[in-house]
Structures are given as C-alpha cells and as structure tokens.
Amino acid sequence: MSFKRMIHAVETHSGEPMRVITGGVPNIPGDTVYEQMKWLKENDDQLRKLMLREPRGYPPLCCNLIVPPKHPDAAAGFIVMEQVEYPVMSGGNTISVATVLLETGMIPMQEPVTEFKIESPAGLIGIRAECRNGKVKNVTFENVPAFAAHLDAKIAVPELGKVTVDVGWGGMFYVIADVRQFDRLELVPEQGAEIARVSSLILRAAQDQLPVEHPDYPGIGITISQLSGPTANPAADRKNAVTMASGPVDFDNPATWTGSVDRCPCGTGTCARMATLHAKGELALHQQFRHEGVLGTVYTGELVRKTKVGPYDAVVPTVGGQSWITGYSTHVLDPEDPFTEGFTVGDLWA
C-alpha cells in the first residue's frame, strides 16, 4: 500500500509525553536549524498538526524532529513542535532528544558520561549525559541565556482581578504568577483543570498588557504561563505548574479558558524562573535550584555565569533531569484519510 506519509518516531516521557521523529521527513532547506524551523512552519506545518492532533496525538503531547546539524560543533539538530507554536528551545524536549540519540545509538554512548552539543533553533546546547549499563540516567543541558523582562508587574485579569506576575525568557517567554494569590488553588494533579483555567486567563491578559521582545527573535511574545509556589518535598526548593495552550484564549468564550498542564517540571520554565529569581536577588550564581513539577518529579537547575542579551542582563542556566523511552512507532497517512492534518474536538481542546 502507498501512503501519503510514513513517519518513524521514538515515544518518550519525562512526565510530559515527548515524541521524537527519527525518520520519514525529507531534507529541510536552511543554513541553520532556526532557518529550517521557519521553513517547516511556512511550508510543511502539516507535519506538526499530523503528529500532535488526534488521532495520533492529544493536547499535552510535544514532538521533536531530529535533523542533521548545520553548526560544525553540533552532533545533531532538532526542531521542537508544540500545539500552538514552534518554540526555539524546550528543556524537557532537549532531555528526551538527547536520551533518544544515545539510547538508539545515533550518537555513541560513553559511560559514565557522554558530552556533546546539539543544535536547536535557539543555537548550540551543551549536553552532559550520565550513562550506566546502556541507559541514560540523567541529562544536564546548558541552555541559551535567560533573562527577566518584567518583574512584579500588575495585570488586570478577567475573573481573577489584579494579579502580580513576572515575565522571563528561558527559551520561551513565560508569564509567572505565585499561586498563593489564588484561594484554595494548589499545584497538584487533582486541580489540573483549575490550574489550566487560571493560567490561560493570566496568559491572555499578559499577552495583551505586557509587551516583550527578544533581540534575536522578533515577533515572539509571551506564549506560555507558569504558576509557582512552595513545596513540601524535601528534595525540592519550589514547585511549579506550566500550562501550554492548545488554542487561542478568548475572554468572551469560557470554552477557551483551558490548556494542558505540563507533566514534567519544565526545563525552559525552570530557566525563566531562575532568571526572574536572580533578578530579584533571591537566587545566586552556582546555587542549586530544585524545581518540582505537578507529578512530584524534579529538575535541578543552576545559574553558571552572567551575560547580556541585547539590553537585558542575562544569566546562563543549566538544567538536569531524566527521560524514559516508552515505545517505538510508525505513523502513516492513508491516501483516503480525509483528516490530512488531524483534528481537534472541543471536549479536550480549546
């Protein structure tokens, strides 16, 4: 049988499900992985929709495409695809991609530590993987510089009133709010729907009221929200819940006040949080920062040096965590399938 598309992938999770495409996508034009990402967005967005929407995907799923690197120092490249955007960087996805590259033999594994660089759309990412008995036990990556764009900003949020937020860049622009501003809201899986509702409203309000601009990525605004709070876990310093949009938020349509709570502690969200805490004088360089997600898993971050990003004072973060392979899959598009870009239904999707 002849299929329109046949995509080979490795299924992984770090709490969050993260699909890694290893074959079936032809050469993508571009002199950098960033240019390849832009080409994919403009010319073959079907791939993202096909892999992330139903029937092959569902709202929390992320997807990555491994590509040959363009930078001479990189061992591989990867493009991140999410439900509403192509982030230039994602931490949890980086951990999963590095795990797949090593555990499938695409990059030779050396025990006890394998070090290499991978090229994301945001640039080179340093990888340090702790390996034992053929398994990747921990991946620590050195991220692109992170910085605070807004601190203690007051925004007016429908249904919620005045909310105090920070905005930080960690590879994406996050609006971050302390969960203690909201009565009876806790960062636990059982309150996932309310976490998503509150977070989506904050996201849209921040998009409307807090302009941001990255010197290297014009046009990228705030696309994701994070609730932050204390933790009772002795192995963590702070807890968070990041909500990823599954569609645009419309204040006049409560059906859109939703999203998908990140099941992992969120790598770029950890970087953004560390950058805002550092800007407030609450986190020093070389101070370990253990960030717990809603499932109780922990990523460990550290700010290793200061730098500048255009006019912003920035810091270079590292984040470490683990990902696990859950399966291997081949996805096809039947020539008679009418849903060539997948589909969404309002019971699960915004």
Image: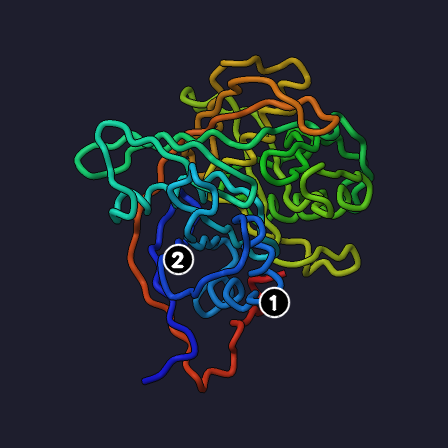
Label 1 neighbourhood size at 10 Å, few (<14), some (14-19), many (20+)? few
Classify mark 1: helix, strand or loop: loop
Left or right of residue 90, residue 221 in this image: right
In this rendering, the label closer to the viewer, 1 or 2 = 2
Which residue is located at x 78 percent, y 55 percent?
251
Q: Are marks 1 and 2 in contact (CB under 8 Å)?
A: no
- Which one is in front, 342 or 214? 214
Q: In the image shown, does 321 or 131 lie closer to the viewer?
A: 131
* Amino acid type indicated by mark 2: Ile
Asked if residue 80 is positioned above or below residue 28 in the image, the reply reads above
- Colour setup of the view: rainbow
Few, some or many C-alpha atoms within 10 Å of disc 2 (few <14, some 14-19, many ≥20)? many
Please tell me whether mark 2 sits on a helix, a strand or a loop: strand
Give above or below for 347 relative to 71. Answer: below
N-terminal of the pair, mark 1 or mark 2, is 2
**In-image side of 32 versus 298 (left or right):** right
Residue nearest the viewer, comparing 117 with 214: 117
Residue indicated by mark 2 = 21
Determine whether 300 is above or below 284 in the image.
below
Q: Residue furthest left?
A: 133
Q: Which residue is mark 1?
A: 346
